Image (cartoon, rainbow, N blue to C red):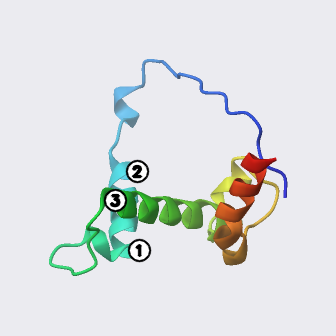
Amino acid sequence: MTWPTETIRTSVWGVPDPLYITSAHVKRNNLTMRMHMRRFTRLTNAFSKKAQNHQRALALHFMYYNFVKRRSAVKTTPAIAAGVTDREWTLRDLANLPDVLRDSEAA
């Protein structure tokens, strides 16, 4: 497994066409989060007592959603489609990620 060594942030500016401005993507993302993580629904006992636990739950969700879960429309994961990785990750890869990161920082 190869890991990116550098991240380049780029600002994107422009004048979007008002006919194509929509909140559908944001609404869909929020619905997906609510359906996958019970901590975002009301009247639940799965809430996070600590902000750090909440942050970690979000990180796990987005890593799984983008690197592990295949989409039927594109027949692959969003990470492969975007060119972030060259293979589909497994749950084992996701579970071992903290160990891999810790080892790379120690080296």
Q: Residue furthest bottom?
A: 45
Circle on res. 36: 1
Structural distance between the alpha carbons of marks 3 and 2: 9 Å
Disc nearer the start of the sequence (2/1): 2
Q: Disc 3 on helix, strand or loop?
A: helix
Mark 1 surroundings within 10 Å by alpha-carbon count, few (fewer than 14), some (14 through 19), many (20 or more) = few
Q: Where 21 falls versus 9 (above or below)?
A: below
Identify which residue, 44 or 73, lies in the foreground: 44
Residue holding disc 2: 25
Q: Where 3 falls versus 28 (above or below)?
A: above
- Of badges 2 and 1, the one in the foreground is 1
Residue holding disc 3: 30
Report x, y in % for residue 4: 76, 42
What residue appears at the point 45 percent right and 61 percent down from the top-left corner? 56
**Dot 2 amino acid type:** His
From the image, which quarter does the N terminus lie in? bottom right
- Of badges 3 and 2, the one in the foreground is 3
Mark 2 surroundings within 10 Å by alpha-carbon count, few (fewer than 14), some (14 through 19), many (20 or more) = few
Report x, y in % for residue 73: 62, 66
Disc nearer the start of the sequence (3/1): 3
Q: Disc 2 on helix, strand or loop?
A: helix
**Dot 1 amino acid type:** His
Identify which residue, 105 or 57, lies in the foreground: 105
Q: Residue furthest left?
A: 43
